[in-house]
Image (cartoon, rainbow, N blue to C red):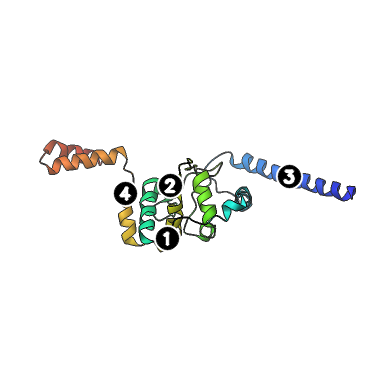
Amino acid sequence: MKAKLLGVVVILILVGLGLFGWVGYQLFTTGFSAKTEPHALEVLMARQIRHLAIPIEKRNAANPVPLNADIVKEGRTHFADHCAVCHSNDGSGQTPIGKNVYPKAPDLRLSDTQSLSDGELFWVIHNGIRFTAMPAWGSGDPEKDIDSWKLVHFIRHLPQLTQEELDEMKTLNPKTPKERLEEEAFEQFLQGDDAAAGNAEGHHH
């Protein structure tokens, strides 16, 4: 019995050393650049660790927010204002930030995300994921928890997103200081301020 246990321990140590050596090799060859793509083994390990890190009662938690069109709209509004800067309005992750963090922002429309339970999606939104660009949005405020559950409903809706919904989301995305200045100058121009017209044109260069 002791010999068998010792054999298992030795195997675990060897596997651990092998993984440590592999990670060391990857860092040696690619450094800490965020431009490299995670290896398939790294992705698999990260997903398994994430799954095991979520307590089973949290994974199995049901969404307490009833699903209806108004709830999906509220989730869409929240997503456009808070999440789209990294994840894109359509959930593809194809934004300057989403494409250049490590690991890259996932495509939320695909099965890797859609196959997660509602509880898992809520947990990721609420707690974030270490060593990624995904922050923890949970604050212990029950009202904000409800907002996160609404986001879960919207994430489920992403594969069916319509062009009309995307167009609406564009109007809800946060604006950069440059965009705000251009809008203000354009509004002044419409009110007859010719100087503002020159400023508006200057900001486009």
Marks 4,3: beta carbons within 8 A: no
Spot occupied by residue 11 in the image (x, y as percentages of width and height): 80, 48
Q: Amino acid at mark 3?
A: Gly
Q: Which mark is residue 67?
A: 1
- Tag 1 secondary structure: loop
Q: Which mark is residue 163?
A: none
State the CA–CA distance, disc 2 to disc 4: 15 Å
Q: Label 3 belongs to which residue?
A: 16
Q: Label 4 belongs to which residue?
A: 172
Foreground label between 4 and 1: 1
Instruction: Decide which of tag 1 and tag 3 comes sooner along the chain.
Output: 3
Question: As drawn, is 185 to the left or to the right of 97?
Answer: left
- Tag 4 secondary structure: loop
State the CA–CA distance, disc 1 to disc 2: 25 Å
Q: Residue at x 87, y 51 (%)?
A: 4
Q: Amino acid at mark 1?
A: Leu
